[in-house]
Amino acid sequence: MYAVVETGGKQYRVEVGDSIQVERLDAEPGEDVTLDRVLMLSDSGSVTVGRPTVDGAKVVASVDEQGKGKKIRIFKMRPKKRYRKSQGHRQKLTTLTIKDIVGA
């Protein structure tokens, strides 16, 4: 059984036991989080597609850690204009382990 869930504006295909990194969620390590934006469910060949979500479906995950992603460098330059701008970004991430997928 697998599901496609949406969180942080991105979609993830998850199965029980998978570990994924999503944009930061407000939860402490060790807590359980419920992802209720389930877009699709697949169970032994039968596929349920939501419009836009599957009613009554949810994914339960536990928070493993809160951390930061890899640093990204942004550099802008205009040739012959003496314009240079350097900027960095480091995304905050939450690592989740999928515990259960509850279908409708």
Image: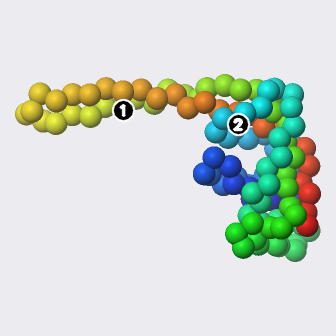
Q: Quadrant of residue 77?
A: top left
Asked whether, in this view, residue 30 is left or right of residue 71, the answer is right
Instruction: Look at the numbered disc 1 and give the secondary structure of its residue.
Output: strand
Q: Position of residue 64 (x, y in %)?
A: 80, 29
Q: Give coordinates of residue 48: x percent, y percent.
A: 82, 72
Residue at x 60% of width, y 30% of height: 92
Secondary structure beneath dot 2 equals loop
Residue visible at 85% across and 51% down in the picture:
59
- Which quarter of the figure is the N terminus placed in? bottom right
Q: Residues within 10 Å of mark 2 (few under 14, many from 20)?
A: some
Please name the amino acid that badge 2 sits on. Leu
**Disc 1 versus disc 2: nearer the observer:** 2
Quick one: 55 or 99, which is closer to the camera?
55
Is the residue under label 2 in contact with that under label 1 (CB below 8 Å)? no
> What colour scheme has been applied to the protein in the rendered image?
rainbow
Residue on which the image places disc 1: 74
Residue 15 in view here: no
Q: Residue 13's spot in the image, x, y percent?
A: 74, 55
Q: Identify the amino acid type marked 1.
A: Ile
For label 1, the crowd category at 10 Å Cα-Cα, with few meaning under 14, some 14 to 19 and many 20 or more, is few
Q: Residue furthest front?
A: 26
Quadrant of the image containing the C terminus = bottom right
Residue at 79% across, 50% down: 35
Q: Residue at x 31, y 31 (%)?
A: 75
Label 2: which residue?
25
Q: Is residue 48 above or below residue 1?
A: below
Q: Is 10 drawn above or below residue 103 in the view shown?
A: above
